[in-house]
Image (spheres, rainbow, N blue to C red):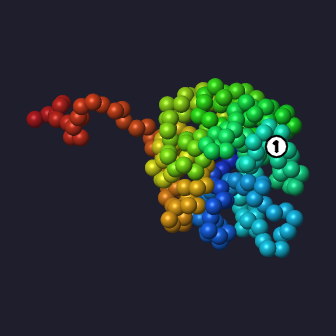
């Protein structure tokens, strides 16, 4: 297989790592970590942006629009109506029609409300939004979201911020097998090996926030995640060897001429 770039709504990206902006100790650390990650798409919770008072600065001041694609998200929305309203607000204030859609169903687990998510996606796709939905690792829901017209599907690896890694690689493989849009693992990545596994499965990208922002050294972790996504993608393209029950000699003697 030949390498291709990540394509979302017709736009190409060299990096397959998407990062968030929350939980950093300062905007300065956030800015440097994002730079070191190599990410070209940065997701921002609209509710974290103070649009009324810019005198004290905003995280957007640290994210030059000529360098990054800003992906607003509807984090913190618990109903279809709330999520749709937040998406419209994002477009109204100049973020465009690209939206990471979240409709949360439970405050403790932060699992998606998939019924509400589907309804919100229908409304936004119909009105011209490029929708990237955060959902469970449910192949049926992912297929339905694709059929609605979402530009990608973003199944979770594990609960948001848990760092548990990919809990159900078999569901992810089914989603990948049936999807005709990019599959981007969203939520639950804890360390570089988790990101590499997602990419080795064949995912088109990985989105993360807490794994970098809350690491003991966010700058080093940002670099590790950058390299892990790249290595995992390369391994997927290379094609791993088949697993075997018994040993296979690295230097076989069968067929050698004496």
Q: Please, is residue 257 above or below residue 16 in the view?
A: above
- Residue 35 visible? The answer is no
**Residue depicted at 65% across the width and 70% down the height:** 26
Neighbour tally class for label 1: few under 14, some 14-19, many 20 plus, Cα within 10 Å? some
Residue under pointer 1: 82
Residue 152 at x, y = what percent? Answer: 68, 38
12 horizontally vs 208: left or right: right
**Residue depicted at 84% across the width and 34% down the height:** 123
Q: Residue furthest front?
A: 108
Answer with the quarter of the image where residue 126 lies: top right
Q: Count of labels shown?
A: 1
Answer with the quarter of the image where residue 251 lies: top left
- Residue 126 visible? The answer is yes
Helix, strand or loop for disc 1: helix
Q: Residue furthest right?
A: 92
**Residue depicted at 18% across the width and 31% down the height:** 254
Residue 51 at x, y = what percent? Answer: 85, 62
Q: Residue furthest bottom?
A: 55
**Residue depicted at 40% across the width and 38% down the height:** 240
Residue 99 at x, y = what percent? Answer: 76, 46
- Tell which of 104 and 249 is nearer to you: 104
- The quadrant of the picture occupied by the C terminus is top left
């Amino acid at each position: 297989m030949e390498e291709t770039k990540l394509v979302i709504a017709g736009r190409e990206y060299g990096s397959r790592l998407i990062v968030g902006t929350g939980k950093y100790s300062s905007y300065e650390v956030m800015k440097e970590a994002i730079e070191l990650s190599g990410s070209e798409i940065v997701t921002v919770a609209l509710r974290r942006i103070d649009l009324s008072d810019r005198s004290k600065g905003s995280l957007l001041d640290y994210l030059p629009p000529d360098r990054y694609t800003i992906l607003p998200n509807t984090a913190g929305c618990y109903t279809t109506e709330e999520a749709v309203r937040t998406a419209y607000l994002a477009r109204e204030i100049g973020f465009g029609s690209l939206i990471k859609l979240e409709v949360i169903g439970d405050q403790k687990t932060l699992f998606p409300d998939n019924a509400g998510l589907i309804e919100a996606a229908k409304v936004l796709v119909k009105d011209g939004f490029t929708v990237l939905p955060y959902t469970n690792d449910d192949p049926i829901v992912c297929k339905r979201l694709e059929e609605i017209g979402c530009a990608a599907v973003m199944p979770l690896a594990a609960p948001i911020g848990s760092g548990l890694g990919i809990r159900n690689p078999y569901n992810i493989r089914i989603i990948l097998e049936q999807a005709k849009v990019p599959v981007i693992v969203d939520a639950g990545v804890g360390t570089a090996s988790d990101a590499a596994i997602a990419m080795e499965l064949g995912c088109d990208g990985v989105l993360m926030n807490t794994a970098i922002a809350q690491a003991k050294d966010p700058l080093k972790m940002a670099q590790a995640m950058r390299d892990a996504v790249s290595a995992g993608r390369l391994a997927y393209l290379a094609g791993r060897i088949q697993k075997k029950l018994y040993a296979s000699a690295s230097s076989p003697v069968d067929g050698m001429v004496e």
